[in-house]
Amino acid sequence: MVDVLKNSKRRRARHCQWYIAARYNNAHTNEVIAVFLAGKTDIAEEGVRCADGIPRNLWLCTFGDVQAFLHSRGHAQIQFEILRKCDGERYPRLAPKFLTHNKKVARRASERLQRPKGAQSATAP
């Protein structure tokens, strides 16, 4: 039997810390984040310098919390940014779009905008 993993490069798993920051220091968003993370974490860091040089007020959270915020983004009317700091990095940086952008939701939204007002979607019963 041939060892398939012999020639492949194995990457070491990276440990990342995830942060949520209210965009534009929005008071409503800060309240929503504080209520959601109450009991889970009380770690709020103020004025943390990020990789892009902008100081932000950050809330430490898990990736599961990040996903919950991303799913509720449209319903709660909140404006936030997702940041992460992985092993060896000195400053938190904005998370890449592929981690925080739901392609299916974006595609459906663009289809809705292009569709005439009276037309129904193909997926509707």
Image: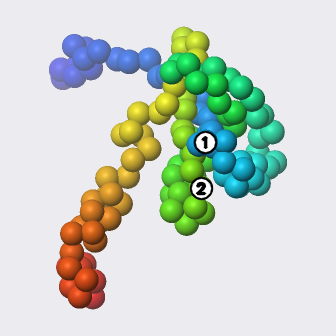
Mark toward the start of the polypeptide (2 vs 1): 1
Which quarter of the figure has residue 44?
Answer: top right
Q: Distance between the residues labelled 2 and 1?
A: 11 Å
Whole-percent x and y of residue 3?
A: 23, 19
Whole-percent x and y of residue 11?
A: 38, 18
Q: Residue 119 shows which numbered tag?
A: none
Whole-percent x and y of residue 30?
A: 71, 48
Q: In this view, does 60 lie above or below 2?
A: below
In which quadrant is the N terminus drawn? top left
Q: Are marks 2 and 1 in contact (CB under 8 Å)?
A: no
**Residue at 44%, 44% in the rendered image:** 100
Amino acid type of the residue tagged 2 in the rendering: Ile
Q: How many marks?
A: 2
Q: How crowded is mark 2: few (under 14 residues within 10 Å), some or many (20 or more)?
A: some
**Residue at 27%, 63% in the rendered image:** 110
Q: Name the residue under label 1.
A: 24
Amino acid type of the residue tagged 1 in the rendering: Tyr
Using residue 33 as the reference point, say whether residue 5 is left or right of it: left
